[in-house]
Image (spheres, coloured by chain):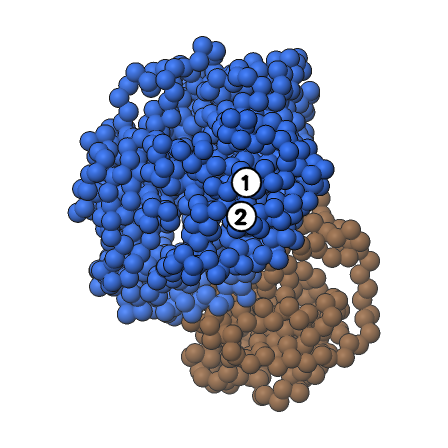
Chain colours: A blue, B brown
Amino acid sequence: MSTFPGGAKAVVIGCGIVGNSLAYHLTQQGWTDVVLIDKGPLPNPGGSTGHASNFIFPVDHSKEMTVLTLESQRQYIALGVNTECGGIEVARTEERMEELRRRMASAKAWGVDSARLVTPAEIKELVPFIDESILLGGFYCPTVSVVDSLRAGTIMREAAVESGALTVFASTQVAGIDVEHGRVRRVRTSRGDIEAETVVIACGVWSPLLAAMAGARIPLVPMVHQMIDIGPVPRFAKASKAIEYPIVRDMDVFMYERQDGIGLEVGSYAHRSIQHDPEDIPTIEAAALSPTEFPFTQTDFDPQLADALDLMPEIVGDESVGVKYAINGLISLTPDGMPILGETPEVKGLWSAAAVWVKEGPGVGKSVAEWMVHGESHIDLHSSDVSRFHAHQQTRSHVRARTFEAFPKTYGIVHPVEQWASDRNLRLSPMHERQKELGAVFYEAAGWERPQWYEANAPLVERYGVAAREAEWDARWWSPIINAEHLAMREHAGIFDLSAFAIFDVNGARALDALQRAVLAQVDVAVGRVVYTPVLGSLGGFKSDLTIMRLGDDSFRIVTGGAHGMADRKLFADLLPEDGSASLVDVTTAWTTIGVWGPRARDILASVTSDDVSNEGFPFGTCRTIEIGSQLVLASRISYVGDLGWELYVPIEQGARLWDLLWEAGRPHELTACGIGVYGTTGRLEKSYRAYAAELESEYTVIEAGMQRPKVKEQDFVGKDAHLRHREEEPAAILCTLTVDDHTSASGVKRFPLGREPITLRDGKPLTDSKGRRSYVTSAGAGPSLGKYILMAYLPPEHAVEGSQELAVEYMTEHFPVTVDVVGPRPIFDPENTRIRS
Amino acid sequence: MNILTCVKRVPMTGGTIVLTADEQAIETRHLGFTISPHEECGIEEAVRLVEAHGGESVVLTLGPAEAEEQLRDCMAIGAARAIHLVTDGEEWDPQATAAAIAAAIHADGTAFDLILFGNESADAGNYQVAIRVAYALGLPVVSGIKGISVADGQVRCERESNGGRDVYEVPLPAVVSVLEGLNLPRYPSVPGRMRAKSKPVAASTPPRRESRLARRRLVVPAGQGKQAEILGHGPDAAPRVVEILQQIGLL
């Protein structure tokens, strides 16, 4: 072992699968001076990698997770540590079978074509020791594999050491991480101090403690996952390799069974949520097994024994097969179930690569390395970005509440818009009480309680003749009231609570320069103009889309969606000049936003203000302060729902007053309170408006999204080079608006896809563009004014043909015919935008 | 034949034993619990003898309510029922323990042919309880036993001694304390685990006679802990490995 260095380009802390892989990829990406340390011994320092079950099921409903997993599996194969054994998710209930059909859609959408549904008899053939009589079927994925993650980490670490770019120190305890002027400076260790520009915390369940040393937060909680190993299994006595039979996930009882040599490993997510605090993890010396292998708590596992026995009586019921090993293994869980990756918003140069499981480890290592070295990764990591968390999400109380609730859903059937039950009512808009009186059904957005629809509007359903949805799954977390509110808005006017917007003021002599650099659109516009713009990454893909109001020469207001608001805040803050000549202040909780849209919106607004709100006096795309009663209100004439109207910004303590004034003024105009179901889905989709994280992701270009402007601004901006290049290329896919021709399923029930389903040819053949990307539904929802059901999807150019009727959407393994209505950005409803501009 | 095996719940320690701040107990926050390897062999032996000769295998413990976990573990191996002398978790001295066990054996009423103990408990290690119980019951006792066979109303016990074995033939009923190595205990099967959940546990709270043995404090012996020596890396380490294998007689 060489002498401990005094400095390095980067220090990676943690020799689990993530740290090893990340250190290796940093050297592959060109960094030559990387130091990797761990407090434990090598090759198994005692973290969660060491006790991982090490199997990989590639298909997840999350695209980001599937892409990371597939990349990881590719690397494990290249390292020679991947044993393909196949895997089956089995169903004991019809509800689960439906979930497996939905699994098929995700497999096809993310390009895992080998997956197929299998009958109980086929399961029996694949897994002869199973009792197929209790099963209805299964989802079989032949590429499911078992990997040797310790070996993979060792190979990568040693290759990087061999190249001379990496130095490794085991048994090196971190005592502190020093931060100076907001930037990480050095790591203090038991072997000495090491100065570094960049420090990565890849410490799994210990990560929150390391982050705290630097004043940052990595909100994860160590939780127990129970595993037992039984054997020797007579059937496996002559096993020639570690695994010869497919892994079985017994989804309905939240368990899995897999061969491990001559034994059978039985794992469970069915037990109670058992949480620990990171500071309670014992030292390596004090741990009976390893620090992350806690003593087995038999009583938690007992109820699962019967389930395992039912499924595999031949093995589990064999009196000669003993329980040889049983642990409560610690794993990392996060409030939203996704990893925690990227530079921390608190400390420049301090990165997190935490809450990562073996199945996505090497993919994360490569992606975070690209991000660190080049400023952006090829895989879109927005759902895993450490800067996504709002303040409340970083608290231990919230992390505990949400992970406690999420753990039993590990193998659960989770609806795509399922709402959390725990730790609600964290952020209440000033109109909250009024909304409760209207029977608001609140969904959570960025911690805000936001009305999705109002039960008080139930009578509108009959008035507008909105049909209910027949299939329970399609109707779950949905109401026909949404469509009715939409139609009321289109006929008269709707009032919306938009408090969940994230709002940042950028001020100062160089505010304009900073914003020009940050966004694609020209921001040097007249004071009082509102600019809608994409925000690009260095590779020219989408990082966000938002609006910027120019309030003065040196004064701008950024308004963006709450869900992604914190990441946007970091993105802009990072581009501010260091000399303080421009500043960003988060004014999210200083202002509340109320939207009023619909043909009567002007009549309503005019009745409460003496300011000129005529089309000439207050044109579309402008903003200015008007008086409404005793309030100064910043009014912005834009629309995300495709109707005439304004966003109205007032200090948050005046929000309720403004709501009341508008509500009263709206009575004669049949103003309807409308939920986010209209704002985010029906209104938006009728206008074919794109949404970040749905249509807009970093793997798509501005051209593909149909959002290019005639000219590119002269000023430099992030992603400009790539964007100019993209403009010269033929797009590999074009964002299109489609409608469903016939919703009738084979059983005669009308079905409504909810989003993320594959778009296929009518015979079910998937569409793949020249970049290898599948066509899938980026957003789905009703277009009540059109009387059609709208889907958005990127289609390869040969299929992006208006009027084309050769395509279908796959939903629950059935194919529903669709028509391509619009290729490119033209709205499907009111294509000339006469309503907005009236 | 009827066999009673007595076990004690003890912490399953890691490499380093950590004491509580008052030095009165082992810090068990991160630890699981178990019985001693001696007792595991005792339970296994009892189950095997009953399998061979018929009768009933009963397990007994004196310990806190949580010690039911260890009783269930023993019943998962094959013990038919359990007797739980529930304490408040305080350590009882050997005299008090032996008196309570002897009383419980009387109270149970079963004519046990053989009463098995581990040679000593894994934590206190007083080496006394088996002998005191035998004395109280007026039974013969042999200790440190690594071989047992039963025939013709006698138990034949083997004890390892320097260069050979001492063999005792003792008339039943008798008390025997055993050592790890007596047999290779089985792992519990899943059906065994499931059956154990519904096997009967007779719990009672015995009176505690006054302790005559007082513990002042615990001390962790110096040098205790994981003693891992790195012999080297790669092929260079081979000669040292060979040397060690020779030292321990494997080569």
User: Which mark, residue A669?
Assistant: 2
Against A156, residue B29 (above or below) is below
Image position, residue A135 (x, y; %): 30, 66
Image position, residue B7 (x, y; %): 61, 70
Closer-to-camera residue (B191/A819): A819
Closer-to-camera residue (A325/B39): A325
Relative to A406, A155 lies left or right: left
Q: Quadrant of residue A513?
A: top right
Specify the amino acid type for callout 2. Answer: His
- Kindly check if marks 1 and 2 are in contact, taking CB atoms under 8 A apart as contact: yes
- Residue labelled with disc 1: A603
Closer-to-camera residue (A722/A772): A722
- Identify the subunit bearing mark 1: A
Image position, residue A457 (x, y; %): 51, 57
Residue A172 shows up from this direction: no
Residue A265 shows up from this direction: yes
Q: Please report the residue visible at 38 percent of the width from the left and 26 percent of the height from the top.
A: A707
Q: Please report the residue visible at 29 percent of the width from the left and 58 percent of the height from the top.
A: A750
Q: Please report the residue visible at 82 percent of the width from the left and 74 percent of the height from the top.
A: B210
- Identify the subunit bearing mark 2: A
**Which of the two discs, 1 and 2, labels the residue nearer the N terminus?**
1
Local crowd size for mark 1, using a 10 Å CA cut-off: few (<14), some (14–19), many (≥20): some
Image position, residue B157 (x, y; %): 53, 73
- Determine the secondary structure under disc 2: helix
